[in-house]
Amino acid sequence: MSKHISITTAVNPPYIPTKTIKHLIQLKLFNNDNEVHSLIIKIDLKHTLKLIIRRYRLSLATLPVALISIIFLFQIRGFANSGNFSGLGDSLRRTCSFITYWGPVLCTIIEMLLQFDIIKLLLNFVDCVKVNDNLFNKSYSKFQKNEFLGNGSLSLDSIFIDYLVLMLSLGLVMLLGGLILLVENLITKCKKNETYETTNDESKEKISKSSLKQILSLGRVIKFFILIVAVFFYVPYQLVFTLLTISHLFYVIFLFISSSSKINNKNTIEFNKTVLLMMLSILPICIPIVVVFLHNFAVNWKTPFRSHHNVLAIFPIISLVFCLQNGMMLKQEKNFNFRSTCFLLAYICFFGILFGVRNTYFIYHLFNLLACTLCIGMF
């Protein structure tokens, strides 16, 4: 007679203020009547992976933003030096190759550095989001919270989990980037199979390009103020960010359709693709608020979010999307704004790796600040 026993265990969740001693599983077999001939112990790898993803789910929302920000940083620096904005596909391949081979080394170095109290104190100083110690009855040590993914120990299992989560995040980035490149390739192939015929339509000649541009500009201004007023009175800014992401997605598809072989046009397309990739990676951070808002609206509970009507939290992103959809591009200048943009991208990567799991929502505000510097760099 065989019996199957399933045992599920988990250690302390990450970033819990009071740490307890980790005990190993101790199995004891009590046999009174029957004789045990064999004992088989198996590890359910599929269920183990699910538990790891459930525990480190917030890191899967922050580490992709960190990886995309470092890609964006190298693209902007390359554009400032050579005038050519590197392609998204090449940047993704280089990042994937580097993280795959050097990921374990990076995880080991980070875990080793975070074992020193002076490093923890320094990280606590540069952390722009402070944790209220009274929330945990002052049991949350200022050194204890600075841990990579909340593990707080230098061991092979911690390094393996760090590398596993890093590779899963890289896979999400490659998936999003691959979908964008797939849509671009499909549109390019469809364009090659089309035959264009020139027709003389007298009605189209009567339309002035300048007047059409003014109408479009007027429409953008009206939409701009509608979004601002909606956020100010009722709609949470996360919903507006979701709408802007969808709008920019369609605009990038429009760029694929109307693309040409000019260098400036290629730079504009690659720049918009990277911005879209970063917006898509930040979208999961805003989705929970949007779901709650739509649910409340569906059940006729129209109580607005008091803390989500900060117009400044969406104003730079709206301006960035409107500037991009107006065909604007970063200027090839190494000025103070360029250095500020590079520093901000580096800090987003730094914050997403070390602090993003605990302060996930703040990554959105960092991107909002990045949108402000990008808009300034276009003028």
Image (cartoon, rainbow, N blue to C red):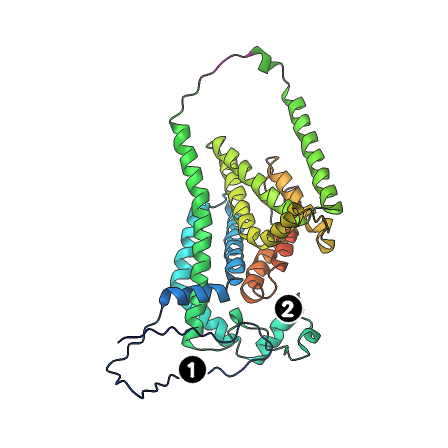
**Mark 2 or mark 1, whichever is nearer to me:** 1
Q: Nearer the viewer, residue 322 or 284?
A: 284
Q: Which disc number belongs to residue 126?
A: 2
Residue type, numbered disc 1: Leu
Left or right placement of residue 222 versus residue 345 in this view: right
Please indicate, yes or no, whether residue 331 appears anywhere in the rendered image: no
Q: CA distance from mark 2 to mark 1?
A: 36 Å
Position of residue 370 measured from the top left corner of the image (x, y, whole percent) = 63, 52
* Residue in the image at 49% along x and 13% along y: 199
Furthest residue to the front? 33
The span shown in magenta is: 197-201
Q: Main secondary structure of the magenta part?
A: loop
87 sits to left or right of 216: left
- Badge 2 local density, few (<14 within 10 Å), some, or many (20+)? few
Task: Give residue 332's quadrant in the image.
Answer: top right
Q: Along the polypeptide, which appears first: circle 2 or circle 1?
A: 1
Residue 342 rendering spot, x and y as whole percentages: 58, 55
Task: Report the residue at 63% width, 22% height from top.
Answer: 209
